[in-house]
Image (spheres, rainbow, N blue to C red):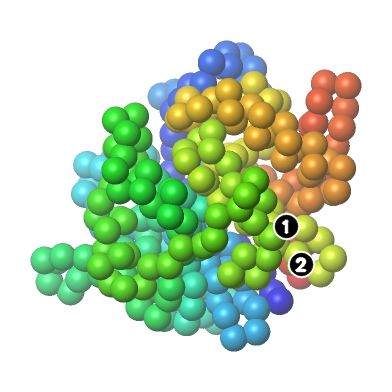
Amino acid sequence: MQLYPINAGNFKLDGGAMFGVVPKSLWQRTNPADDNNMIDIAARCLLIEDNNRLILIDTGMGNKQSDKFYGYYFLWGDDTIDKSLAKYGFHRDDITDVFMTHLHFDHCGGSIQWNKDKTGYEPAFKNTIFWSNPNHWLWATKPNRREKASFLKENILPMEESGQLKFTSLPENRFLKNSELGFDIFFADGHTDKQMIPMINYKGKTICFMADLLPTAGHLPLPFVMGYDTRPLLTLDEKEVFLNMAADQNFYLFLEHDAHNEIITVKHTEKGVRLNQTYTCNDIFN
């Protein structure tokens, strides 16, 4: 097995929304804001090369939305999925599986693209299987009013219409062991229903793709919960369970949205679980 970071692009989000009720005087220490109160956000995806499978975890925003839409998110940098794949000698047509932690637009938008004449949509990965789970799919296709703006039908419905959509199994508790894709999955409901956190056994290490359970290293304190989370009290419990486990077992936490910290480990302290060490992907994957 080999792992590769795939940068799908960078953007900005409101710092207050990213940290909920936490005062700016606290969160700006780790996530400094610009003059518009916006903080840097990455869309750092992960590619797993395992025998004859190439599994891509999440796909970023994509490029099919309007300029007005992207204007809300202050895109920066020149990273794209295609450039990142090419860096490692791959093309999007090589991808066998796209695993979506959840179906918010900044995690799955790159899975679907315009067709050639822009009359409709088609899979951006023509040889892939798209993976979700039945509970989250229902949640996303019949969205609540809080999340409706994040579940864009043009990102989601074409997966099913293409015949390329499959669902993972659901666990009896939070953990699905040895899923259909060869890694364990932690299911979390605080941010959105049945978000999936892959836990990959890689060369004796456990690499955890943290998605929106832990967006950045600045979110390590338990009360530092995003304003986007639909069930923040549940997020508190899920973070506590996962971070204690991560500290106990020395998990390596791959941060999808942290523009400045790629991988971290955590440790127990008198104040709770806190940052231990930071790593680049090259430190861990090479």
Instruction: Give left or right: position of 156 versus 5.
Output: left
Q: Amino acid at mark 1?
A: Ile
For image coordinates 67% across by 51% down, the residue present is 175
What is the number of the mark on residue 62?
A: none
Counting from the top left corner in percent of width and height, residue 269 is at 88, 27
**Callout 2–callout 1 Cβ contact below 8 Å:** yes
Q: Amino acid at mark 2?
A: Tyr
For image coordinates 67% across by 34% down, the residue present is 239
- Would residue 186 be visible to someone looking at this image? no
Counting from the top left corner in percent of width and height, residue 265 is at 79, 45
Would you name the residue on which mark 1 appears? 207
- Would residue 116 be visible to someone looking at this image? yes
Instruction: Give left or right: position of 106 versus 112.
Output: right
Instruction: Give left or right: position of 165 versus 205.
Output: left
For image coordinates 62% across by 65% down, the residue present is 179
**Pointer 1: residues within 10 angstroms few (<14), some, or many (20+)?**
many
Q: Is residue 104 above or below residue 19?
A: below
Instruction: Tell me where residue 155 sits by quadrant.
Output: bottom left
Counting from the top left corner in percent of width and height, residue 205 is at 81, 61
Q: Is residue 117 above or below residue 14?
A: below
Counting from the top left corner in percent of width and height, residue 200 is at 70, 62
